[in-house]
Structure formats: structure tokens, C-alpha cells
Amino acid sequence: MTVHRIGFYVLLVLVTIGFVVVILPFYSAIFWAVIHAVIFHPAHSRIEGLVGRRRSLAAALSVLMCVCLVIVPGMLVLSALVQEASSLYERLDRGEIDIWHALTQAKATLPVYVQEWLDTLKLKQQFTDPDTGLSSAMMEGGRFFAGRAFSLGQNALQFFIAFGVMLYLLFFLFRDGRAITVMVRRAIPLSDDHTRQFTAKFASVVRATMRGNIIIALVQGTIGGLTFWALGIEPALLWGVLMILLSLLPVIGAALVWLPAAVYLALIGAWVKVAVLVVVGGFVISLVDNLLRPLLVGKETRMPDYVVLVSTIGGISLIGINGFVIGPLFAALFISAWSIFISERDSNPSHFG
């Protein structure tokens, strides 16, 4: 390898790093534009066929479709969620919600020996101590949330700029997606066969897994939220959205919300509500997963539940809320690469020693 070739490779790496640093502030906008383009690509292809291959018009209509189906409803739900969370915080701050009183009522329904054991834990001190009590911790959490909401309001301009960048990129990803894909395939330092296998398998796994997980989470969270609303468990919207997010985690999912609620209702003696919540949570919500996942994901492209769980939690711990999607995406990338390697090793064992 000549000095000029080495210098060129060094320059290539440096300018690539520089470009990544420049676009890093908008990585979320770029990421979500790519995700929308991948998920809605089949629908965009149909729109493109209907408008006679006029790519710009098809891209504009596809962006409008994404805005109407995903972005506007998401913003409306987020706005209502912020209002409910702020209202809950204000009620806690004014003392309208007395958590200790509710727990005392629940404790009175327990056997005497259980009550004596709970007394040894000094739970009242944990809830009422102004410095270290759990109530104080919850209030601090509420203040943190309120502060984040205020910060979001202060950074509204930055949010709208990122939102505009996402829509702008989404338009060009729809319009020039095929050309961009070809260019990326040519740039990847792999053989044409490897590149084709890798991109095809990765796209199928990502599209099936993400589409299935998101739709299933939306259905499960909606059913759970409506059940909470019907049973008078407030704030129902807040719990429903939380169940949507947690439903992205397989196996445990929405049970992290409805199961503690059922336990609390049992402690206060609301047995009819307990029965309804257990039936809906234990059977209906679980049935949704068992029925929809094979249809939306399929057996061939489905990632193991434990891989989705670990990659989702790991993604969240590393990069925050975007980790709900980025974690499983990298898991799909990992599975795709190793599946190709295993397939080639089995078909050509002599090449691997």
C-alpha cells in the first residue's frame, strides 16, 4: 500500500468523523426520519404507483401520511400526557392525594401478623420524613418532571428545528431512497453478495420486528388505559402511555403497571375491579400479543424475546428514550451479520479452516 493510499484512507476517516460530529446534534431527527422511511416504504411504493411515478409528489404525500398517522396523534397524546402529569403533581403538592392514608387503609385489611411485620419496617417514617421519606422523593421527582417540561418549553425553537429537519430528510429519503440505498451499498466495503444478503435480511428483521412491537404495544397500552379509565383509576392516560412504553418489553411489559394496580385494589377490598383488571391484563392483553405477533412479525424474522428485552433495556440505559428503538435495531444488525456468517460457514466449511 502506497503512502498516498494510506494518506487518502486517513483523510477519509478524519472527514467522516468530522461529518458525524457536525450532524450529531440532530442525530435523533436523522434517526427517526430513517425509521419512518423504512417502516412506511411499502405504503410509499403504493403511493408512487398511484401518482404515475412522480417522485416528488409521491414523497410529499408520504410525508403528509406520516404526519397525519403518527406525528400529529403522537403530539396530541404527549400534550395530554404532560397536562395529566402536571395535574397529578399539583394534587400531590396540595396534599389532595394522601398516599400514606391510602396505604393505611390497605394495611388494615391485612392479617394482624402481617401488620405487625409491616410496623417493624417503619414505613410511616419512610413516607412522612421530610428529608428522606418516599413522599419527599416523589415530590422531588415531580419537581424534576416539571423542570424538564419547563426546559422543553424553553427549547421549543430547537425542537421545531429538529422536527423540520426530520420532515425535510424524510421527504428526500422517500424521493431518493432507491438511489441512496444503491450508493450506500456501493460504499460498504463488502462483496456485492454480502451486501445484498445483509441489507435484505436486516431490512426484513427491522421492519417486521419494529412494526410488530410498536403496533402490539399501542394495542396493549390502549386496552390497559381504557380499562383503567372504566375502573376509575386515575390518571388513566398517564398509565396507558406508560403501558404502551413498557409493552415494548416482551414478557413483563404492561404487567408492570396493571399488576401493582390489581394488588392495590385487592388491598382496599375492591374485588370486582380486581377481577376485571386481572381478566383484562392476564388474558386480553396477553392474547393480543399471542395473536398479533405471529401475524405482524412472523417466525422467520422474529427476534427472541430475551434478545429484545436485553437490547431494549441496554439501549435505554445508554442513550435514553431513543434506546427503545436503537437497542433492538442493533440487535437485528447483530443477528443479521452472524446469520450470514453461519450460513456461509456451513455451506463452505473449507473457507473457514
Image (tube, grey):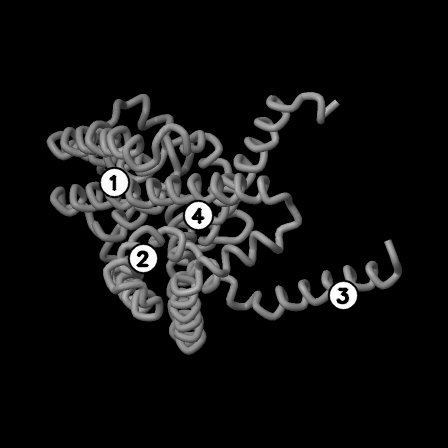
- Please tell me in which quadrant of the rendered image residue 124 appears: top left
- Please tell me in which quadrant of the rendered image residue 348 appears: top right
Residue 225, x across and y down, in percent: 21, 46
Mark number displayed over residue 44? 2
Q: Is residue 226 left or right of residue 41?
A: left
Q: Amino acid at mark 1?
A: Gln
For the residue labelled by badge 2, is the local secondary structure a helix, a strand or a loop? helix
The residue that label 4 is drawn on is 324
The residue that label 1 is drawn on is 220
For the residue labelled by badge 3, is the local secondary structure a helix, a strand or a loop? helix
The residue that label 3 is drawn on is 11
Q: Nearer the viewer, mark 3 or mark 4?
A: 3
Q: Residues within 10 Å of mark 3 (few under 14, many from 20)?
A: few
Q: CA distance from mark 1 to mark 3?
A: 50 Å
Residue 155, x across and y down, in percent: 43, 74
Q: Residue at x 61, y 28 (%)?
A: 344
